[in-house]
Amino acid sequence: MLIFPKVLFVTNKDDLAIDYLIYKFMDRKIPYLRLNSEDIVEYSITYNFADDIIVIYNDYKYNFRDLHSVYFRRAPTIFPNCQNLDDTNFINGERRDFLEGLYLALNCKWINPLFSTYKAERKIYQLSVAKEVGFKIPNTILSNDPKQITNFIKNNSNCIIKPICHGLQITKNGAYSIYTSEIKDIGWLEQDAIFESPVLIQNKIEKYRDIRATVIGKQIFAVEIETNDIDKTDWRKPNLLKDYKEHKLPDDLQALIFELHKKLDLVYSAFDFILTPEGEYYFLETNPAGEWVWLERELNLPISDAIISELLH
């Protein structure tokens, strides 16, 4: 059977947001193709620079001639084992370069552009651009020098530490997340040696509520998050009780969000802010592949409809 997909989902197997969207695509009979990087050996993919890109998967033949858009959710980094383990690094490099090159050759709309996503995920870069466009950001230091970090903490009273990259840690015993934490003891800084890795430390902003703003094109779905976290450091911790309600962002803050999106070349991202008791908003970060399904379910927000509309128009 020959299919001309309108949308390509670039992701991996454990992406629940794409699972959720696909049900809606099936209900609306919109042709699509989901490409999981773990399944690369199950796809027959051909591109010869003369004809249309052809993919064969599960006895279906997909022709990319009418492809309108790509929803880029997960980078192609997770692959199946190679037959010869000694070849793993080389083969996986070939796989990733092939997929990224193929995606970049597609002349269609992207949510979000591949390398714009990679660039925007860098917290140092997005913080610098956010400050440039006019967001308030916490006092911040990135350093591997314990003396510089100690001075920063002493000058900023309460401080937090957070991952520079994502907080997912994968070990031979399983996976777990590293969350933002308050620094309550600086004894670990009493050393002369440079750290193995720099750390990201910010002054702790007094918090009234956490705000998550999901942005799709020119639409913003802002949500106020209240938790029972005594330290008020990271609402994402799984053991916390959470309460959600819709939140209206000030017009000037919405304008800054759209300006940052323009500079980062993004169509979709999930912003995290702190709302202070005085009504000030502090930018923490934005995630170009941030999750959104749970908020749609909690508050019946039409986020998926906005994404589908953006993908098809």
Image (cartoon, rainbow, N blue to C red):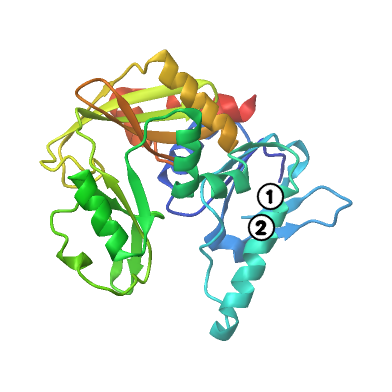
Local secondary structure at mark 2: helix
For marks 2 and 1, give the CA distance. Answer: 6 Å
What amino acid is labelled 1 in the image?
A: Tyr
Q: Position of residue 263 (x, y in %)?
A: 58, 34
Q: Are marks 2 and 1 in contact (CB under 8 Å)?
A: yes
Q: Nearer the viewer, residue 273 or 10?
A: 273
Q: Residue at x 64, y 59 (%)?
A: 43
Q: In terms of secondary structure, where does tag 1 sit?
A: helix
> Looking at the image, can residue 219 be seen?
yes
Quadrant assignment for the C terminus: top right
Q: Nearer the viewer, residue 67 or 76?
A: 76
User: Within the image, what quadrant is residue 233 found in?
Assistant: top left
Using the rendered view, name the quadrant where residue 205 is placed: top left
Q: Residue at x 24, y 58 (%)?
A: 150
Q: Position of residue 156 (x, y in %)?
A: 23, 44
Using the image, determine if residue 149 lies above or below residue 292: below
The residue carrying mark 2 is: 99
Between 62 and 165, the one lying in front of the other is 165
Instruction: Look at the picture and state if 76 lies above or below 233.
Output: below
Q: Residue at x 51, y 51 (%)?
A: 74
Q: Is residue 200 left or right of residue 108?
A: left
Q: Residue at x 33, y 35 (%)?
A: 294
In front here: 84 or 206? 206
- Badge 1 crowding class, 10 Å Cα cut-off, few under 14, some 14 to 19, many 20 or more, is some
Q: Which residue in the protein does label 1 denote? A: 103
Q: Position of residue 272 (x, y in %)?
A: 35, 35
Q: Is residue 86 above or below residue 199?
A: below
Q: Amino acid at mark 2?
A: Leu
Counting other residues with Cα less than 10 Å from the Cα at mark 2, is it few (<14), some (14-19), or many (20 or more)?
A: some
Residue at the farthest right position: 50
Percent coordinates x, y for residue 135 in the rendering: 42, 29
| Residue 288 shows in the view | no
